[in-house]
Amino acid sequence: MALPSHVTILDVGPRDGLQNEKESVSTEHKAQLVSMLQDAGLKEIEVTSFVSPRWVPQMGDNAALMAAIERKPGVRYSVLVPNTKGLEPALASRPDEILVFTAASEAFTQKNINCSIAESLERFAPVIEGAHAAGLKVRAAVSCALGCPYEGEITADQVEAVVKPLRELGVDAIDIADTIGIGTPRRVQAAMERALKHFPLAEVSGHFHDTYGQALTNIYASLELGVHGFHASVSGLGGCPYAKGATGNVATEDVVFMLDGLGISTGIDLDKLVDAGAFISNVLGRPPVSRVARAVLAKRAG
Ligand code: HMG
Ligand code: MG
C-alpha cells in the first residue's frame, strides 16, 4: 500500500507530557504551550485530564487551564475523562473531544484506574453516552497494547478483546497505545490490524512512547497499513505515573522531521514547533528530549 499523503498529529504534550512532572507547572505556562503548539500548526491538542487530583496533582488545574487557553478556529481540544465524576466538569470546560482510557492488561488497568478492564468498560458507558449527548466525539485509548510493565508481553488477541467491546459501547475512535514503548514494527502492525477490524482507518491512531527508541519505526510500520493519525508530545515530554520507567511519547519534532522527509504533509511548521519545545523545556529547566529539536537548536546557536 502507498503511504498516506497526509498525517494528522495530535500533540499530547500538555497532558501526557506534563502529567508526570513532579514540580507544578503553572496554568499560564501550560496555556502558553497550547498557544505555541497551535501557532506551529497543530490541529489536535490534548490539553488536560479530569482525573482525581489526588492521583495526578499536575492536572488539578484542568478547568482553569481549559478556561485560560485561547481557542483557535479549526483546532480541536481534547481532555481525558475516567468516570462520570470527571464528565460534568469536563463538559463544562467545552472540549471538542473526550478520551476514555483502559488497557489491554488487567494489572495496568488496576494500577492506573483502580478497577478491572470489565469494570472500566462499565464505567465508560455513561461517560460515552453523556459526551455523545453533548455532541462530542469520544476516543478511547488502549494502554499497554504492546506490553505491560506488570504482565509482560501482550498479544494481539488481548488488544482485540478490549477494542471490540469499546466499539460496541459506541466509541468513535481508538488509540493503540504503547505505554512502555516496547513494541516493534511487526507486532505493532498485528495490533493495528486488530483495531482496523473494528474501527475505520481514519479513526485508528498510534500512540507510541519512545522508551526503547522504536517509536518512529513503529509509526512507519503503521503508515504502511495506511494509518494516518499519530500522537506525539512536543520535545518528547512525559511518561506515565503508573508505568515506572516509561519515558515520554515520541517527540513531535522527530515525527514531523521524518514525515517532511517522506513528503507526507502535516501542516506543522518545524521551526515554530521547535520554539514551542524550547519554551516548555526552559520552563522545566532541562533540554528537549527530541533529537531533532536539539539538532535544530544547535544549528541555530552555531
Ligand atoms: P478511585 O480512588 O478508585 O475512585 O480512583 P473513587 O470513585 O473511589 O473516588 C475516590 C475519590 O476520588 C473521591 O473523593 C472521588 O470524589 C474522587 P473523596 O470522596 O475521597 O474526597 N474522584 C475524582 N475527583 C476528581 N475527578 C474525578 C474523580 N473520580 C473520583 N474524575 C480514578 C479512580 C479513576 C478516579 C483514579 O484512579 C484516577 O484518577 N486515575 C487516573 C490515572 C491517570 O490519570 N493516569 C494517567 C492517564 S492514562 C495515560 O497516561 C495513558 C495514555 O496516555 C495512553 C498510554 O500511553 O497508554 C492515555
Ligand atoms: Mg501515553
Image (tube, rainbow, N blue to C red):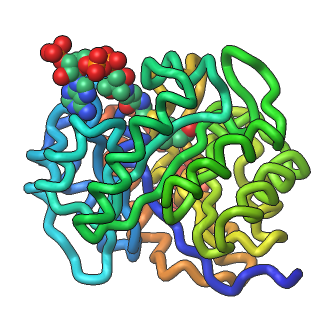
Can residue 243 be seen in this snapshot? yes
Note whether 192 is above or below 81 in the view shown: below
Residue occupying image coordinates x 27% and y 59%: 34
Rendering quarter of residue 159: top right
Q: Nearer the viewer, residue 233 or 113?
A: 113
Horizontally, is 47 left or right of 160 in the view?
left
Task: Reply above or below: 236 against 10.
Answer: above
Query: From the image, which quarter does the N terminus lie in?
Result: bottom right
Q: Position of residue 162 (x, y in %)?
A: 65, 42
Q: Is residue 39 left or right of residue 246?
A: left
Q: At which x and y percent is residue 23?
A: 26, 23
> Can residue 54 be seen from the camera position used here?
no
| Spot occupied by residue 280 in the image (x, y as percentages of width and height) | 32, 46
Instruction: Give residue 131's quadrant in the image.
Output: bottom left
Which residue: 81% across, 59% down? Answer: 193
Residue found at x 76% / y 69%: 223
Closer to us: 266 or 79: 79
Count of labels in the image: 0
User: What residue is shown at x 69% (from left), y 86% (from top)?
Assistant: 5
| Nearest the eye: 157 or 181 | 157
**Taking 208 as reference, is 135 above or below it?**
below
Residue 173 image offset from top left, x and y in percent: 53, 63
288 relative to 293, above or below? above
